[in-house]
Image: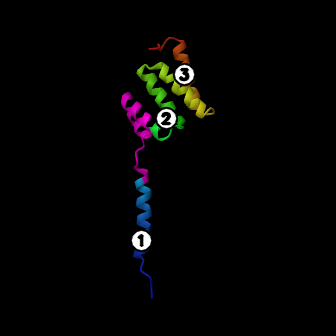
Amino acid sequence: MKRPLVPLFLLFAFFCSGACARSLVITPLNAGITAAGEERWEEAIQCWKKALEQDPGSAAAHNNLAVAYEKRGAFDEAGREYGQALRLDPGNAMIKGNYDSFKARLEAGQGRRP
């Protein structure tokens, strides 16, 4: 007696739907990136704070939050967040580059401390 193929197809569809659903989940980190891309900095800050509530060890969230604070003129907060990002991931060239650029802008007087 032949076994029907339908149960195997349903099982395959079930696993595929789970994989597809996971790819559609928008995390606070990604929502912040979207908001920042549209220059909605306050929204981005809130998203990245939420991301840090979920994962305080996220160097990416600390870095992104630092960028948003810098854009909003909150330079002390930006400096603290860059520092935390670098402590968490000291070898990350992007974070180091962002921090170095931030320091250079402050030293050149392009940013003022609130």
Q: CA distance from mark 1 to mark 2?
A: 40 Å
Q: Please state which amino acid type lies under the numbered disc 1.
A: Phe
Q: Quadrant of residue 84?
A: top right
Query: Do residues under tags 3 and 1 come within 8 Å of each other at their CB atoms?
Result: no
Looking at the image, residue 38 lies above or below residue 30 = above
Q: Which residue is mark 2?
A: 61
Which residue is depicted at the point 52% across and 24% down? 80
Looking at the image, residue 82 lies above or below residue 16 = above
Disc with the residue nearer the chain's start (1 vs 2) = 1
Q: Which residue is mark 1?
A: 9
Residue 58 percent location from the top left of the image: 52, 37
Query: Do residues under tags 1 and 2 come within 8 Å of each other at their CB atoms?
Result: no
Looking at the image, residue 52 lies above or below residue 20 = above
Q: CA distance from mark 2 to mark 3?
A: 18 Å
Quarter of the image that includes the N terminus:
bottom left
- Residue 39 visible in the shown view: no
The tag on residue 101 is: 3
- Residue 95 visible in the shown view: yes
Classify 10 Å Cα crowding around label 1: few (below 14), some (14-19), many (20 and above): few
Looking at the image, residue 89 lies above or below residue 102 = below
Coloring applied to the structure: rainbow
Q: Report the magenta residues as a range.
A: 22-50
- Tell me the element at label 2: helix
Whether 23 is among the magenta residues is yes
Q: Please state which amino acid type lies under the numbered disc 2.
A: Ala
Disc with the residue nearer the chain's start (3 vs 1) = 1
- Tell me the element at label 3: helix
- Magenta: predominant secondary structure element? helix
Q: Please state which amino acid type lies under the numbered disc 3.
A: Ser
Query: Do residues under tags 2 and 3 come within 8 Å of each other at their CB atoms?
Result: no
Which residue is depicted at the point 36% across and 32% down? 43
